[in-house]
């Protein structure tokens, strides 16, 4: 990560001076962290049926080849013989699948019992969610301001946009309260964030949380240690002095959680 960060910063210094230093600085940090995480850690690829063993997958591939032979048969005898072999392979696949799934359930329930005994609620919740299966998400219809149901996705998206635009952008109060000046001036430090404060904020990040729109997980900030502090300190100092933030920081993801009743 340190090498990637230095290389990107060196390339940026060789280019012409940019108009927006804050955007350029954040772009360097983001590229360094995301590219390093993807190169070193990679992306998690989940198979559709993780409980199937390699032996079962080989049998599935063999069954697929036998099915292709059936389609290429030219005579009835050849086709009948190929179907016979295919049916036998199909029974072997199903038998092996049942065996693998029983073993997988046994192993994962044992892991859940061990997690419960250790008070590892994160692992216990993950296993419980896996065993219970994925629940089908029901997209409830949304009503407009007149109470009419909006069935199309485009109409619902537009209604959600209108709703959050009204909620998150309220007009100023007509009669603002009069706040009296303090009797004494409070000793509040208004200088830019220090490296110690940045280190404290990074240390308070919780692991296992989803990354934001920038794609940088909290583990990356924590594991980089001093490098994260040194990378963020000049950026946060510029943000504090210029009172501007990168455009990426203005983007968020809103997830609706429908409850009982009409929306």
Image (cartoon, rainbow, N blue to C red):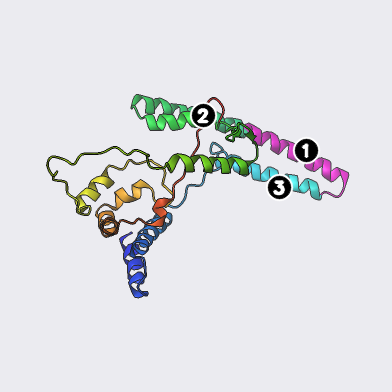
Secondary structure, mark 2, is helix
Residue placed under numbered mark 2 in the picture: 131
Front-most of 108 and 205?
205
Residue placed under numbered mark 3 in the picture: 65
Q: Residue at x 47, y 50 (%)?
A: 43
Q: Residue at x 60, y 42 (%)?
A: 57
Work out how far the residue at label 2 is from the one at label 3, CA to CA, in angstroms: 32 Å
Residue placed under numbered mark 1 in the picture: 84
Q: Which mark is residue 60?
A: none
The picture places residue 79, in percent across and down from the top left corner, at: 83, 44
Work out how far the residue at label 3 is from the one at label 1, CA to CA, in angstroms: 14 Å
Q: Is residue 23 visible?
A: yes
Lower sequence index among marks 2 and 1: 1
Q: Residues within 10 Å of mark 3 (few under 14, many from 20)?
A: few
Image: magenta residue range: 73-95
Furthest toward the left, the residue is: 184
Lower sequence index among marks 3 and 1: 3
Which secondary structure class fits the magenta region best? Answer: helix
Q: Residues within 10 Å of mark 1 (few under 14, many from 20)?
A: some
The picture places residue 44, in percent across and down from the top left corner, at: 47, 47
Name the image quarter holding residue 58.
Answer: top right
Q: For marks 2 and 3, give the one nearer the viewer.
A: 2
The magenta stretch spans residue 115: no
Secondary structure, mark 3, is helix
Q: For marks 2 and 1, give the one nearer the viewer.
A: 2
């Amino acid at each position: 990560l340190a090498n990637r960060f230095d290389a990107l910063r060196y390339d940026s210094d060789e280019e012409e001076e940019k108009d927006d230093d804050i955007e350029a600085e954040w772009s360097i940090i983001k590229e360094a962290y995301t590219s390093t995480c993807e190169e070193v850690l990679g992306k998690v690829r989940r198979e559709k049926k993780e409980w199937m063993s390699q032996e079962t997958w080989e049998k599935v591939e063999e069954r697929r080849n036998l099915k292709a032979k059936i389609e290429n048969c030219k005579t009835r005898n050849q086709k009948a013989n190929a179907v016979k072999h295919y049916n036998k392979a199909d029974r072997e696949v199903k038998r092996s699948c049942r065996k693998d799934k029983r073993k997988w359930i046994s192993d994962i329930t044992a892991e859940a019992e061990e997690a419960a005994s250790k008070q590892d609620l994160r692992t216990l919740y993950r296993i419980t969610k896996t065993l219970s299966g994925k629940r089908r998400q029901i997209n409830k219809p949304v009503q407009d301001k007149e109470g009419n149901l909006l069935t199309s996705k485009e109409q619902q998206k537009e209604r959600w946009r209108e709703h959050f635009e009204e909620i998150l952008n309220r007009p100023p109060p007509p009669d603002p309260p009069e706040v009296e000046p303090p009797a004494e001036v409070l000793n509040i430090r208004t200088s830019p964030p220090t490296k110690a404060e940045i280190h404290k904020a990074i240390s308070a990040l919780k692991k296992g949380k989803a990354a934001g729109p920038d794609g940088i997980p909290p583990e990356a900030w924590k594991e980089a240690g001093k490098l994260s502090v040194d990378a963020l300190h000049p950026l946060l100092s510029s943000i504090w002095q210029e009172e501007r933030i990168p455009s990426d920081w203005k983007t968020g993801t809103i997830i609706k959680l429908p409850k009982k009743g009409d929306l």
